[in-house]
Image (cartoon, grey):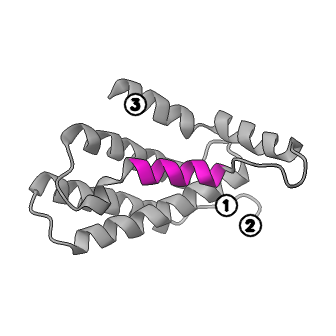
Amino acid sequence: LDLQRAVLAYLMSDQLAGRLIDANDKLDPGAARLELSEVYQRLGRELWADLDAGGPIAKARRELQRDHVNRLAFAVLRPSPGARADARGAQRQEAQALLQRIEAAQRRKIADEPTRLHLADSADTLRQALGARMPRAGI
C-alpha cells in the first residue's frame, strides 16, 4: 500500500504535471501527445474500477481510493502555489467525474457496509471540496 501511495503521489504531483504540460508544448503539431487530463482520467478509471463491478471493495483498495479522493479534494481546495492552471482544471474535472461515478454506484444496492460507508464518505469529501467557496487571486 505504501508503494502504491508513493506512485499515486508522483502521478498527481505538480512536478509531473509541469513536465507533461511543458513537454507537450515542445512537440511538433500533429505528434502524439500524452495529455495531463488523460493521466488523471486513466488513474481514476483504474483506481475506481471496483465501482463498475458493483461488489465489495477490499480494505487495501479502499485505502488507496481514499488517498486518491483526499489528493483530489486537496488539489481543488488548496492548490499549491506551483500548481499549473491546466493541472488544476484537469484535477477539478476528474473530481467531478469521480463524484458522478460514486453517486451512480451508491444508487445501486451495495450489501457490504464498509464499502457503502467508504463510498458515502468519499462522495461527501468530493462534494464539499467542489462546492467550497474559495477566494481567487485577481478577483
The residue that mark 1 highlights is: 136
Q: Nearer the viewer, residue 117 or 50?
A: 50
- Please identify, in this view, whether the residue under mark 3 or under mark 1 is nearer the observer: 3
The residue that mark 3 highlights is: 4
Identify which amino acid the numbered label 3 is placed on: Gln
- Please identify, in this view, whether the residue under mark 2 or under mark 3 is nearer the observer: 3
Give the x, y percent position of residue 119: 26, 59
How many badges with numbers are in the image?
3
Q: Which residues are magenta?
A: 36-46
Query: Does residue 110 belong to the magenta stretch?
Result: no
Q: Secondary structure at mark 1?
A: loop
Identify which amino acid the numbered label 1 is placed on: Arg
Label 3 neighbour load within 10 Å: few <14, some 14-19, many 20+: few
Give the x, y percent position of residue 87: 66, 50
Residue 139: numbered disc: 2
Q: Secondary structure at mark 3?
A: helix
